[in-house]
Image: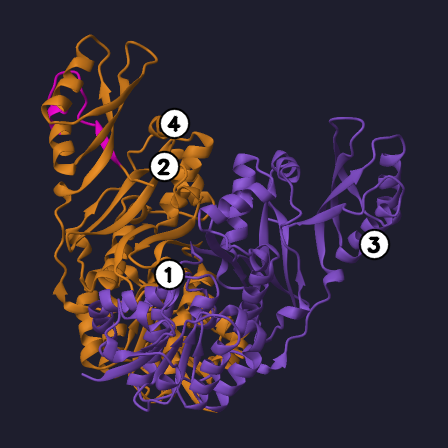
Chain colours: A orange, B purple
Amino acid sequence: MERVRVGLVGLGTVGGGFYELMSRNAGHFEKKMGTSVEIARVAEIDTAKASRSVPRKILAEDYRRIVEDPEIQVVIELVGGTDTAYDIIRSAIEAGKHVITANKALLALRGAELFALARRKQVELKFEAAVGGGIPIIKVVRESLVGNRIDRIMGILNGTSNYILTQMSEKQLPFADALKQAQEAGFAEADPTLDVSGGDAAHKISLLASFAFGGWVDYRNILCDGITTVTPGEIEFAASAGFCIKLIASAVLVDGKASVAVFPALLPDRHPLALVRNEVNAVFLQCDFLGPALFLGRGAGANATASSVASDLGDLVQSLILHARRGGYPFDPSRALDLYPDSEMEYRFFFHFITANRPGIWAAVTGRLAENGINIESVHQKWEDPSKPSDLYVLVDEAREGQANKALREVCSESGISEQSRFYRILPL
Amino acid sequence: MERVRVGLVGLGTVGGGFYELMSRNAGHFEKKMGTSVEIARVAEIDTAKASRSVPRKILAEDYRRIVEDPEIQVVIELVGGTDTAYDIIRSAIEAGKHVITANKALLALRGAELFALARRKQVELKFEAAVGGGIPIIKVVRESLVGNRIDRIMGILNGTSNYILTQMSEKQLPFADALKQAQEAGFAEADPTLDVSGGDAAHKISLLASFAFGGWVDYRNILCDGITTVTPGEIEFAASAGFCIKLIASAVLVDGKASVAVFPALLPDRHPLALVRNEVNAVFLQCDFLGPALFLGRGAGANATASSVASDLGDLVQSLILHARRGGYPFDPSRALDLYPDSEMEYRFFFHFITANRPGIWAAVTGRLAENGINIESVHQKWEDPSKPSDLYVLVDEAREGQANKALREVCSESGISEQSRFYRILPL
């Protein structure tokens, strides 16, 4: 039987999970692939710790032992970060090796360059684990949907944020308490900024949109709002109106252009994504032939990530057995995708005005909305203590985001209305 | 650019949908695949009708024009049925052509033979559209889960049955009325037997289990119960206890053996499959590394089916571009899978005893259950008119299916208890 030789760089949580998968399920894998796969070398800086699970004779401290080994055909980068990981991936591709990575931050930052390099060197750079963890969404988008025009992608792609919003909603917790609970439960990092700011979801949706729509989307060019300002009061009001609040990573084709963004949004309770609780990830797709579809699973964790790395490895083994490179590239990394302007996107909106408690506030708010052509559906005031600011929740009819932004600025310029006032987009069923 | 030549047999609903997809999305498809695909010939008995959408010069009445054409590399069989379709697929494989089909009934019946023939002739027989319609579940199981041991598959694989059960539940309709409504809405055939008997779901889960577990499962060897006896009273009682009733196609590994079955089951309201309404299909998977995952989408209809046929075609185009055959087969069609005995499966159960209305019934029922070692959780009697039979709903603790069957037979042998009494399995969250 032929044998495919693999080098694994990084034996932390994810690398360790993948090493365990290959140890435990090598038999399954070989039977399904019709060939055997050998983890020929593992590179890990902490060799002392790594030697507890990996035989010393295949262990190395320096990843170059893998990249420079002519027998190794596939390099799996699972160290994370954007510095050493970049060196590992670039040098592996330049050495003519296929690469698998779970590193969304690096791909979002330098993917256009790395994918183009892989194309020139006729190797594959695979990253199923980088988006949606264990959910096989990259393969679905690249291969299963090949006959479709993908019209809309809506993802819950950051488990930390979804966990926090779920706990805020189910236990009426403020953000800070829910974050602390997420940290204690192991669903949030000590520094949660990248997760709760929407940044991690922005990395992922940019990658997914690039492959779905066929041109590069730079995450630095997309709208990205996080969940740090969401309050239990907003969640409670949204619930009373039949909505939940989720951090949505959205990519939509509008007039042939891509609108890609991350923001906390109101979803109708009956939307499939409304049911995604805690750390679970999910992707909802709308395609011209398939219609609507939902894919749901674990978005993080050693084992789910390992499952996706193994899927990529299976694909590469197929290519290697066939002694041939795969055909078409699903997108052109050198072509930046035309982005549809955020300000032109149309949504229903949920405004939350934080106001002083005195006559004239309602008139100012409703007047300014009217001047901007925004049609009010309902207004609800939460009012506890007349000496404290009150919360004015306003649901409005469909409007352009530019209109909503302008109206918000103008309302906030009125006396007695806080600059902290804000709005949320409402997504349709 | 290279060109792949395809022959399409059958231009009914599904064939027409696929022809439209290739007409409308040929550009997308070619860009993603890096090659062009030509529908070189279409065979359809009703040439008059077909000629309204297909150019006459590529139209044929006889499928042999396709099978015997040496230029055609891929044959797509979309005529349905198990007679002519068998001849088409067999002769195409024997002519060395790859085949794509959506024909679950035929594959369930003669798949072991056809897959073995394809293997001998070194061609592929692909069938993404046969299970779950547009949901890319075959590809996920074959490729994305290659690193996993698949422990459990639970599917809602028959849209007609799910539509009927949803309508019965939401509108308190009896089965016959909900069936009539499904027929009027186009979600049930004039003869709905195959759907409501569970037969169609049995075809699909047998195929899926074969590929997931690596050996052939003959649908004639699996337990198959339909939904024709489900009543609004049962649904109402189940709901009051926190469950919904769904037709579940189930495949589970128990002690290394496969337990494969189709039956109406009670699912906790919070189970992901409980949320699947009307004609939608879904597959819930439990794997050792991926963990739980859900895939949901349209299970039937021309467009969703066309999407899956296009996915198969995309895979074949990759193989053909590479001028190479794919490597491993995911299962051995000549090896029948060991099935775990149904009687040994353990579930909680929901018994529905239809009884005379007189003293001694409760004692008889509870006595017989006790004799069979079955532990009662709760008993609920629905009792309208003392002169009519009453409904005794009993929830019991976990027991073997053999125990439950024996207890049911013995209770039914008691005077005053109807032979129509029955039980449903309760599946865990």
Residue B113 versus residue A355 in the image, above or below = below
Left or right of B387, for residue B96: left
Residue bearing the label numbered 1:
B302
Residue bearing the label numbered 3:
B406
Q: Could you say which quadrant of the image residue A257 lies in?
A: bottom left
Look at label 4 and name its amino acid.
Glu
Foreground mark, 4 or 1, reads 1
User: From mark 3 to mark 1, how far is it between C-alphas?
Assistant: 45 Å
Mark 4–mark 1 CB contact (< 8 Å): no
In terms of depth relative to the viewer, which is nearer, A307 or A48? A307
Look at label 3 and name its amino acid.
Lys
Residue bearing the label numbered 4:
A236
**What's the residue at 63%, 73% (across, down)?**
B218
User: From mark 2 to mark 1, how far is it between C-alphas?
Assistant: 29 Å
Q: Are marks 2 and 3 on the same chain?
A: no
- Mark 1, secondary structure of its residue: helix
User: From mark 4 to mark 1, how far is it between C-alphas?
Assistant: 42 Å
Q: Are marks 3 and 4 on the same chain?
A: no
Q: Are marks 4 and 1 on the same chain?
A: no
Is B107 in the magenta? no
Residue A261 image point, x, y percent: 22, 48
Mark 2–mark 1 CB contact (< 8 Å): no
User: From mark 2 to mark 3, how far is it between C-alphas?
Assistant: 47 Å
Disc 1: CA contacts within 10 A as few (<14), some (14-19) or many (>=20) = many
Disc 3: CA contacts within 10 A as few (<14), some (14-19) or many (>=20) = some
Instruction: State which region is magenta.
Output: A409-425
Left or right of B403, for residue A419: left
